Amino acid sequence: MDDDSLRSLLAGGRLSGAQRERVLAGALRRSQRRPWRVVGALALVLPAAAAVAFFVRGGAENGSEAGHLVPKGSPAPLLSARCPGRASGTCRTGDRLIFEVAAAKKPGFFAAYAECGARERIWYFPTASGALPQVATGDGTAVIDQAARIGAEHGVGRCALHLFLLPEPASRASVLAFGQGAADGTKADVVIEVEH
């Protein structure tokens, strides 16, 4: 009979002291090697995840979608829209929709419209009378002094908001032409989900 069998017999089927020490030493060796494997795996996975996040979030023109990473000192203003008190990207019928402009280096005029499903385009600015809110320069975030209301015309579901900061007043036709790249300014597209 070998020593391990004898120790097991004397221990009543349980691990002997020497066997417990060997198991513990083996587990300790494996646990000391594991952090390097985890660190190695993270070193490979994190840069790939960061690149995916950057490119997925980088879909907005000029990097101006709300929450997008923008290099420090970037000259492009950030345009966004949201319904206060709701999760990012969601609104409910009856909510107030506010518009924000951050880091505007030049004064300008704010224009916006929505396309919700197969419905007719919903114009926020220019208004029916052709009025556009003015935006002053500043490093902070300015809230446009006029809000919109999420009404029945928005329906329920996905709405694409098209936001513009233009160097001069423009008609609705000019705003649409700007959306095609025919003028100077900044454009951002924001998607919201409208719920009842």
Image: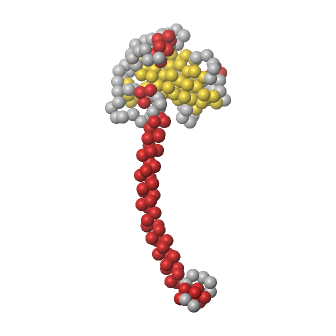
Total marks in image? 0
Q: Residue furthest front?
A: 1
The picture places residue 149, in percent across and down from the top left corner, at: 58, 22
x, y percent for residue 93: 63, 26
Res. 67 visible in picture: no
Residue at screen point 42% across, 60% down: 36
Q: Please say which color scheme the image uses.
A: secondary structure
Q: Residue furthest left?
A: 73
Q: Is residue 196 left or right of residue 108?
A: right
Q: Residue furthest top?
A: 129
Residue shown at 52% from the left, 84% from the top: 17
Residue 137 visible to an observer of this rendering: yes
Q: Position of residue 85 (x, y in %)?
A: 56, 34
The answer to which image quadrant residue 151 occupies is: top right
Residue at left offset 65%, top offset 21%: 152
- Spot occupied by residue 186 in the image (x, y as percentages of width and height): 42, 22
In the displayed structure image, the side of residue 145 where residue 158 appears, left or right: right
Q: On the rendered image, what quadrant is the N terminus found in?
A: bottom right
Quadrant of the snapshot with the C terminus: top right
What residue lies at 44% left-to-right and 53% top-to-bottom? 42
Q: In terms of depth relative to the viewer, which is nearer, 89 or 32?
A: 32
Which quadrant of the structure image shows residue 4? bottom right
